[in-house]
Image (cartoon, helix red, strand yellow):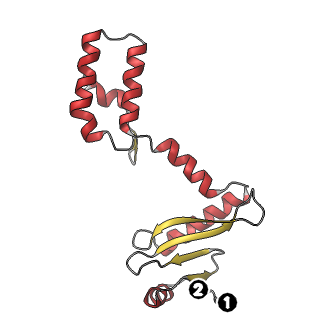
Amino acid sequence: MRIAKKITGKAIRDAIKAGRFSIFSGTEGLYLQLKSVKQPMWRYRYDVPTQQGKKQTISFGPLDRVSIEEAINLAQEARKALAAGVDPLTARKAHRTESDKLFRAVAREWLEAKTNAQVWGGKHLKDTEQKLQLHILPILGDYAATTSWGTLSTDAAVRTCA
């Protein structure tokens, strides 16, 4: 049986030094997973609301990027979602699917919309598609179309090359 410890910098340093799993008190499922001393990960274990008795684990990120306070706040947010009957892992995956659309896909949709609306003639459409393929997509294609500064306006971004 593991004894829960209070989350402190010293408790974390001791857990890393010992190279073992740790469970911290007052956090109801938050722990630091130590697969390697180089990359301890904050994880939160909870009961899945839709499946009786099934446990699930969600990762909040590595210790060097997520502070103790952030990990505790993320665990509290997950608990609030669970109280509302929402599985935090499922919600995060759904959010990522919507928000992590690549610029390449958005540019194709934009070009398709222009084609379907018959806004441009054949030569202009072909030139725009070539410019996208040669100059824009090799650089921006694999970036998420949603960024930390907001949704990237593909119409404005691509218009400069058309």
Q: Secondary structure at mark 1?
A: loop
Reply above or below: 12 against 82: below
Residue 5: horizontal and vertical position, in percent?
59, 87
Reply above or below: 19 against 100: below
Observer able to see residue 161: no
Mark 1: amino acid: Met
Residue closest to the eye, 4 or 6: 4
Mark 2: amino acid: Lys
Name which residue lies at 67% across and 67% down: 46
Name which residue lies at 70% across and 61% down: 48
The residue where tag 2 is placed is: 6
Looking at this rendering, what residue extends furthest in the right direction? 52
Q: Secondary structure at mark 2?
A: strand
Residue 107: horizontal and vertical position, in percent?
36, 30
The residue where tag 1 is placed is: 1
Residue 32 bears which disc, if any? none
Residue 157: horizontal and vertical position, in percent?
30, 31
Which callout, 1 or 2, points at the residue further toward the start of the chain? 1
Reply above or below: 134 against 64: above
Q: Where, by quadrant of the figure, is residue 78 drawn?
A: bottom right
Observer able to see residue 110: yes
Cα distance in 3D space between marks 1 and 2: 16 Å
Reply above or below: 114 against 68: above
Residue 129: horizontal and vertical position, in percent?
28, 23
* Left or right: where 103 falls relative to 25: left
Name which residue lies at 46% across and 77% down: 35
Quadrant, the C terminus:
top left
